[in-house]
Amino acid sequence: MSPESKKLFNIIILGVSFMFIFTAFQTCGNIAQTVITNLNSTDFHGSGYTSMSIIYGVFSASNLLSPSVVAIVKPQLSMVVGGIFYSLYIAVFIQPTTWTFYTASVFIGIAAAVLWTAQGNCLTVNSDENTIGRNSGVFWALLQSSLFFGNLYVYFAWQGKTHISESDRRTVFIALTVISLVGTVLFFLIRKQEDIKAPGEENPANEIPGDSSSAQNKMARALAAFKKSIKLSFTKEIMLLSVTTAYTGLELTFFSGVYGTCIGAVNRFGSEAKSLIGLSGIFIGVGEILGGGIFGLLSKKSRFGRNPVVMLGIVVHFLAFYLIFLNMPNDAPIAPMEGTDDTAYMIPSKNVAIFCSFLLGLGDSCFNTQLLSILGFLYSEDSAPAFAIFKFVQSICAAVAYFYSNYFLLQWQLLIMVVVGFFGTITFFLVEWKAAAALAARGSDYSSI
């Protein structure tokens, strides 16, 4: 197998592994609040929104140190450990108690930072400036396939049910835990980490034989990775891209946790309301996969770079937000277990609701594939710190969004996303224009990025 084929194999295995883990986790996130509101146990007083806020809050703080952890543990083992903690969080829902639920939320936040930093490093070292667009698209399409499979099961299993029983809950979460563990094991198929340069690691040719595994050397690499993260976070490009990244954190919260809850709370959808949560997740996945495939695999055919894709993403999202504003009751995100009988500016339509799910997924893929691509292009030598900063900003904004989702009506949540999305698009354009100018100065073909 040629070196290029080995790298593509690693990207595919990376994507498939994440597909299994996030088939479990994203399905869990999509149905968590609905499941919790249907718990019979009076001893349980948890909130799915609060749990996700804790996860993303801890995730954001942990991203400051995750490059150092990956530098010491190495990317492959980092992803394996991260996958185990994802599985443990999902397993908590089999028999949830308040303290285990929130404790697991803290641990998965730490594990997620390490997992995603290692993923960014693995993606970058298996790519170059000519393949980063393709590889980002392949990974994103495989990752977002996760939205299809888990939610398909939820759609059929919960069809016609207005209440989620204990048996229903246990069956779903036992299956999701097993699926997450399968994805974790698949990380071992990625080539040995000796062949992959970890963040903060020097050129092997400059290392002293027999000394590379010493504690002193590992701490030096960890410190170097931490310093790179701090230094990069104050560069102009990272600060501009942080506005775009902040928007992806807000809309991630909305489509992965809030919108499904809104659909499930609309009583006018009748007995199909709960199963529509699964169908919504499926169509979000369809949009994500379509976007990842088109904008990643066909990236070489683009003569205009990344900006048109991001422009399409914001237009698609603004259309989705407008339709959701017209279609969904304003109190849907914070409705009680009994749901809401209110209407917005039109009678709630199932078809419009599901179409908006597709638009949310498509728009999200536009932003994320291009952010992965531009980060891998600009920071090919500092991939782990760059991706850690990306996840830090994204996760802290997701945490804030999950927190205010407990209190804000739908119209205010949509307005916040519109404002941040508008400015995030502009800042991305500024960075992309500068990247295009730098590439032209080197005499490279702009369409290759």
Image: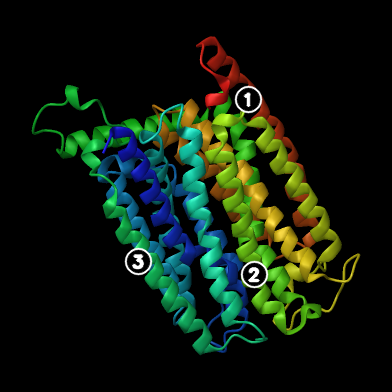
Q: CA distance from mark 2 to mark 1?
A: 36 Å
Above-or-below relation of 321 to 343: above
In-front residue for pair 448/379: 448
Q: Quadrant of residue 63?
A: top left
Nearest-to-viewer mark from 2 and 1:
1
Image quadrant containing the N terminus = top left
The quadrant in which residue 355 appears is bottom right
Circle 1 sits on which residue?
A: 303
Residue 42 to residue 183: above or below? below
Residue 401 location (% of width, % of height): 65, 55
Q: Disc 1 marks which amino acid?
A: Arg
Report, in whole angstroms, how far the alpha carbon at label 1 lies from the one at label 3: 41 Å
Which mark sits nearer the N-terminus, 2 or 1?
A: 2
Q: Mark 2 and 1 residues: CB-CB less than 8 Å, in contact?
A: no
Disc 3 residue type? Leu
- Picture disc at residue 16: none
Query: Sequence order check: which comes first, mark 1 or mark 3?
Result: 3
Name the mark on residue 181.
Answer: 3
Residue 184, given in percent of the width and then of the height, sits at 34, 60
Q: Is residue 343 above or below residue 364?
A: below
Q: Residues within 10 Å of mark 3 (few under 14, many from 20)?
A: many
Query: Mark 1 near mark 3, Cβ–Cβ under 8 Å?
Result: no
Helix, strand or loop under label 3: helix
**Mark 2, residue position:** 279
**Which one is in front in this view, the residue at disc 2 or the one at disc 3?**
2
- Residue 336's spot in the image, x, y percent? 72, 79
One can see residue 47 in this view? no
- Crowding around mark 2 (Cα neighbors within 10 Å: few <14, some 14 to 19, many 20+) is many
Q: Which label's residue is closer to the chain start, 2 or 3?
A: 3
